[in-house]
Image (cartoon, grey):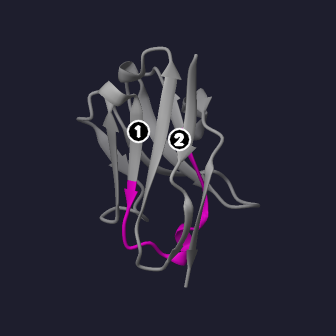
Amino acid sequence: QVQLVESGGGLVQAGGSLRLSCAASGRTFSRTTMAWFRQVPGKEREFVAAISWSGVSIDYADSVKGRFTISRGNAKNTLYLQMNSLKPEDTAVYYCAATYKPTIYRGSDEYGYWGQGTQVTVSS
């Protein structure tokens, strides 16, 4: 089992920045593929970014490419999402997710472990 706890959400003006963190505990974190998803009420959970356990493979949704950066600190069992140039449409609950599958995925069904989410609100 992997337990995931997100933090770092909040209210920010458009154009601002936030850094989300996801602290992992339980089974070996360094061998997990990790991802960030986001969800707004009434919509499907949306892929944001994913990173392989080594950090070599990274994928971003087109909507965040060039503005968001995913990274991980395996020694600290922590996943990060640096979000710059935030837009009102980035407003959502952001979730971190983990899988022991070796490939990065965009589908939420591929991830078996989820955090409780952290709210990000971007005002215009």
Q: Is residue 4 left or right of residue 70?
A: right
Q: Nearer the viewer, residue 94 or 16?
A: 16
Identify the residue at image location x=40%, y=51%. 81
Q: Amino acid at mark 1?
A: Leu
Residue stretch rendered in magenta on the structure? 82-96
Q: Which residue is mark 2?
A: 96
Of the residues shown, which amino acid type is indicated by label 2? Cys
Q: Where residue 56 sits in the image (x, y, percent)? A: 23, 35
43 relative position to 4: left or right: right
Q: Inspect this view and state whether residue 39 appears.
A: yes
> Which residue is painted at 55% across and 43% down in the image?
6
- Label disc, if present, on residue 8 of the rendered structure: none
Query: For mark 1, what is the residue?
Result: 79
User: In the picture shown, does residue 97 fall above or below 1?
Assistant: below
Contact (Cβ within 8 Å) of mark 2 with mark 1? yes
Q: Residue at x 59, y 26 (%)?
A: 112
